Image (tube, rainbow, N blue to C red):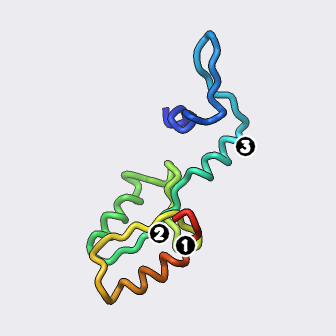
Amino acid sequence: MLLIVILLGTPFLKSSSAGEYALARIDDLMNMAQRTSLWPLTFGLACCAIEMMHFAAPRYDMDRYGVVFRASPRQTDLIIVAGTVTNKMAPALRRIYDQMPEAK
């Protein structure tokens, strides 16, 4: 089911008189999965960061959906800010945001 959702709107989805089917090489599917995976950076400022730990724990296991938490802002697609950003933490958050690659 997840594979079909990902394949909608891609050149892998074909139509015929028998119905729709997906035709792709494994390499192409793996490359597409790597391009569309989220790599978030967690920026926990308060107790809300505990919820991010639960999000990555075995019960929800976001790794199997391609969500891989990164420790470096240079490897991330987005920043999850959990907590209140105070005046003291704002410059640090801005510096981390500036280190992220483009397409922020």
Task: State left or right for residue 79 relative to residue 77.
Answer: left
Rendering coords of residue 1 (x, y %)? 49, 32
Compare marks 2 and 1 and give the one earlier in the sequence. Answer: 2
Rendering coords of residue 30 (x, y %)? 66, 46
Q: Please tell me the numbered disc located at residue 89.
A: none
Compare marks 2 and 3 and give the one earlier in the sequence. Answer: 3
The answer to whether 3 is drawn above or below residue 84 in the figure is above
| Most distant residue in the bottom direction | 88
> Real-space Cα distance between discs 1 and 3?
28 Å
The answer to whether 35 is drawn above or below residue 5 in the figure is below
Query: Is the residue marked by circle 2 packed among few (<14), some (14-19), or many (20+) residues within 10 Å?
Result: many
Mark 1: secondary structure: loop
Q: Are marks 2 and 1 in contact (CB under 8 Å)?
A: yes
> Real-space Cα distance between discs 2 and 1?
10 Å
Q: Nearer the viewer, residue 89 or 42?
A: 89
Point 62% across, 19% down: residue = 15
Mark 2: secondary structure: strand
| Disc 3: which residue | 27
| Most distant residue in the front direction | 103
Task: Say which amino acid is labelled 3.
Answer: Asp
| Disc 1: which residue | 100
Task: Say which amino acid is labelled 1.
Answer: Met
Task: State left or right for residue 97 relative to residue 22.
Answer: left
